[in-house]
Amino acid sequence: MTAFAGESFAAMGGPSGAFLLGTSDLSRCNGNALLAKATDLKKVEESVIVDTSGTTWGVEAVYYRSDEFPSSFFERHLNGSETSNTYNTYFFRIYSEPFVIVIPFKIIVSIENKGNIATVKYFWNGKQETLSGKFPEGTFVIASDFGKFELPWNKLRSFSNQEAQPYNEKEFSYDSTLVTTDGDRFSVANLGGIGKNFSSNSLTFAVNELKLEIEDSKIKTITFDPNGLMTVTIKNGKSKTGKPENLKRFAGFYEKGPFYIRIKDVKKVDFGEN
């Protein structure tokens, strides 16, 4: 089980490289600074974007500006840091029910957009995966070989990256279980809660008029009912039922890669023995 984390929309930093790929929120980071860096980088002609008019653009840097996104959680587990002042590793998202799949751009081989349905090919767990799902509304911010521009999500035909880097997630232990409201069960790793304004190492929920704060390491299971209440069972077997305080999502990793899911779609989480 991982620590519960306050939600962050800041851009995250990763290992240095010649090709900047990523998502960010311009309200929290300097998008111009990101693109300005591209002018000092070696052009990667193998990476291209094709827009819906058929125009092909050589890509030097790209990130995806979209709505709220818990980037710090994934940055911490993928790169071991939450640095917000560099712009080398960012994430694309695809809605693949019941999850929002979070894919670092640097492992993406290609994105195809047909009818606003995205098909993404990417490396995960030593092999190439393919996912199709709803395209997330947002804007690609691109530094091309002909200059900088923004491309709305529905104007992308394709993206390809011949320098995609396989990511090996063998260190993850899939010892937790997530059950959706539809009854589907998933083995997951590094499962954690994502929300606003609560401790990075605890979960807060209201029982009657009291607010309880419990260390995440003590929690065995959390079960949600249709009325918006949750029952927290700790490892000694005791349980309390209350209302979640600011818990919005769970995030973690499963066989297809990083994901997050809204708590309204979750029936139960079991954090296993760790």
Image (cartoon, rainbow, N blue to C red):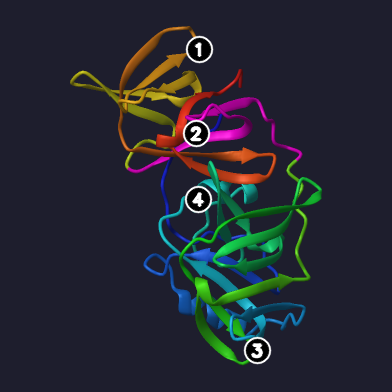
Spatial separation of the CA atoms under disc 2 and disc 3:
42 Å
Q: Residue furthest bottom?
A: 146
Pointer 2: what residue? 3
Pointer 4: what residue? 72
Spatial separation of the CA atoms under disc 3 and disc 4:
30 Å
Amino acid identity at mark 1: Lys
Q: Nearer the viewer, residue 34 or 147?
A: 147
Nearest-to-viewer mark from 2 and 3: 3
Pointer 3: what residue? 145
Residue at the image position 62 percent from the left and 40 percent from the top: 253
- The answer to whether 47 appears left or right of 72 in the picture is right
Magenta part of the chain: 170-196
* In contact (CB < 8 Å): disc 2 and disc 3: no
Helix, strand, or loop for circle 2? loop
The quadrant in which residue 122 appears is: bottom right
Helix, strand, or loop for circle 4? helix
145 is within the stretch colored magenta: no
Crowd band around label 4 with a 10 angstrom C-alpha radius: few (<14), some (14–19), many (20+): many
- The answer to whether 114 appears left or right of 255 in the picture is left
Instruction: Tell me the quadrant of the picture where the N terminus can be found.
Output: top right
Residue 106 lies, with reference to residue 259, above or below; the image says below
Residue 86 visible in this rendered orientation of the protein: no
